[in-house]
Image (cartoon, rainbow, N blue to C red):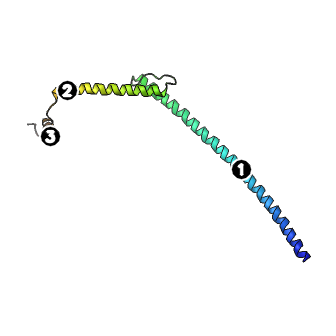
Amino acid sequence: MAALSKNVEEMLIRLAENARTEQDFVLTLSDAIRRVDEQLLRDVRNVALQHELRREAILGELQDLASRLCALPARTQNQPVAAIDQQHQHQHQQQVNQTRAELEALNGQAGDWRQAAQNMHDEFEFTFNGQQRH
């Protein structure tokens, strides 16, 4: 029996050593995974920053091109978003007002849609059938 209890004690000691060794492996693995996660986070943040810088540079180039083409007002540094939105709303309102004025001017000059449809039909026949218009 003494030999049996001695064997049990040796097995318990080996199990404890194996448990410590495996715990050390788990801690080492945990540290390695944490370092990789931190590096991945740094890389993702770096990619996001580079993307924003490229996006800002492209937007600046597009705005410069548009201003040279007189399509948009010249770019101002750090123009507030609210001011840009207000400018777009003002431009949209001007376009709406201009369209309304044009429609009102044409109100008394509207043509007959039936005649316009017949003219289109005649034009198609002439073009595709080679016939002369009536």
Relative to 86, is 13 above or below? Answer: below
Q: 10 Å neighbourhood of mark 3: few (<14), some, or many (≥20)?
A: few
Asked whether, in this view, residue 129 is left or right of residue 75, the answer is: left
N-term-proximal mark, 1 vs 3: 1
Q: Which residue is mark 2?
A: 106
Q: Which residue is mark 3?
A: 121
Asked whether, in this view, residue 125 is left or right of residue 67, the answer is: left
Asked whether, in this view, residue 63 is left or right of residue 8, the answer is: left
Name the residue: 38% across, 28% down.
89
Quadrant of the image occupied by residue 120? top left
Name the residue: 63% across, 43% down.
41
Residue sitting nearer the eye, 63 or 9: 9
In this view, the mark in front (3 or 2): 2
N-term-proximal mark, 2 vs 1: 1
Q: Which mark is residue 120?
A: none
Between marks 3 and 2, how big is the CA–CA gap? 24 Å
Judged from the image, the secondary structure of the residue bearing numbered disc 1 is helix
Judged from the image, the secondary structure of the residue bearing numbered disc 3 is helix
Relative to 61, is 19 above or below? Answer: below
Name the quadrant of the C terminus.
top left
Relative to 32, is 52 above or below? Answer: above
Quadrant of the image occupied by residue 92? top left
Residue 34 in the image, given as x and y percentages of width and height? 69, 48
Between marks 2 and 1, how big is the CA–CA gap? 76 Å
Between marks 1 and 3, how big is the CA–CA gap? 77 Å
Residue 76 in the image, given as x and y percentages of width and height? 49, 22
Judged from the image, the secondary structure of the residue bearing numbered disc 2 is helix
Q: Amino acid at mark 2?
A: Leu
Residue 5 in the image, given as x and y percentages of width and height? 88, 73
N-term-proximal mark, 3 vs 2: 2
